Amino acid sequence: MSVLTVTGLSQRFLDKQLYQDASFQVNEADHLGVVGQNGVGKSTLIKILTGSLEPDAGTIVWKKHLNVGYLDQYVNLKPGQTIMEFLRTAFASLYAKEAKMNEIYADYAADPDDELLEKAGTLQQELEANELYDLDTKIETVATGLGLDAIGLDHPVDALSGGQRSKIILAKLLLEKPDMLLLDEPTNYLDVSHVEWLTGWLQEFEGAFIVISHDFDFLEQVTNAILDIEFGTITKYTGSLHQPCGKKRPITRPT
């Protein structure tokens, strides 16, 4: 089933036509890599898909109620907030429900009422089903996988370098586990061991994703389909990449 349908997409930048009347679909099981030479419009495509850039022509149709996560390097970080506090915002809705549950239990203690107890119990069951009490362990696992433990989870976010900032934004996005991920060069600033960890995480990811990367070895390991942008066209291929004579090329027929 399609989660994203792009039809008749055209985009021009200055005197260059990036794409002309391009169409493709992304399906639920697609782990899709975007490839092409510098300047062909890979990052522009992500901006169009997120709605931050209006295309010259074409339609972008997402599946209804789809939760899409975007690696937004420009997200605002709260001064004074620690890395751990920032990463916990990935589970803000669960922590809000926990606060509500505690409030209801406090009301019950002051004025015992079976209805209050039932409400609190329902919330507690929901929180336990979502592993509320294991969230810090999940956060620490992802943080370690991306090398944030070396910085220290008590480190203030406003004292991070640009590369460290990119890491914590990526970590929060992975913790949120949306239905679909849009990733633009996620391996930037990652050491080899951290790229290996991210590779394993994406291989196990059950949703769809679109990833831009110049690291063809990384793409080879995490993708099962390719969007090739070249000469103003966007072509989707099933399969992954191989690199004869150092040149990328999709290995199977267009779809």
Image: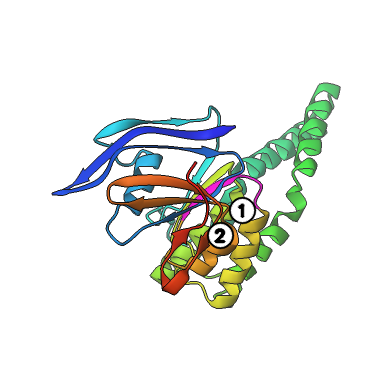
Q: Where's residue 101, x and y in %?
A: 73, 37
- Image marks 1 and 2: residues in contact by CB distance under 8 Å: yes
Give SS at disc 1.
helix
Q: Describe residue 3's horizontal placement relative to residue 185 as left or right.
A: right
At 66% from the left and 42% from the top, the residue drawn is 94
Q: Describe residue 255's horizontal placement relative to residue 104 as left or right.
A: left
Q: Where's residue 4, x and y in %?
A: 49, 35
Residue 14 visible? The answer is no
Q: Where's residue 91, x and y in %?
A: 62, 47
Mark 1 Cα within 10 Å, few/some/many (few <14, many 20+)?
some
Q: How many marks?
A: 2
Q: Nearer the viewer, residue 51 or 250?
A: 250
Tell me if residue 109 is in the magenta stretch.
no
Whether residue 193 is situated above or below residue 232 in the rendered picture: below
Q: Nearer the viewer, residue 131 or 21?
A: 21
Q: Nearer the viewer, residue 189 or 30?
A: 30
Q: Nearer the viewer, residue 125 or 45?
A: 45
Q: Which residue is mark 2?
A: 171
Q: Where's residue 3, x and y in %?
A: 54, 34
**Viewport quadrant of the N terminus:** top right
Q: Which residue is mark 1?
A: 175
At 83% from the left and 24% from the top, the residue drawn is 113
Mark 2 Cα within 10 Å, few/some/many (few <14, many 20+)?
many
Residue 70 visible? The answer is yes
Give SS at disc 2.
helix
At 36% from the left and 51% from the top, the residue drawn is 229
Residue 227's label in the rendered image is none
At 72% from the left and 61% from the top, the residue drawn is 137
Q: Describe residue 30's horizontal placement relative to residue 162 as left or right.
A: right
Q: Amino acid at mark 1?
A: Leu
Q: Amino acid at mark 2?
A: Ala
Q: Which residues are magenta?
A: 205-211
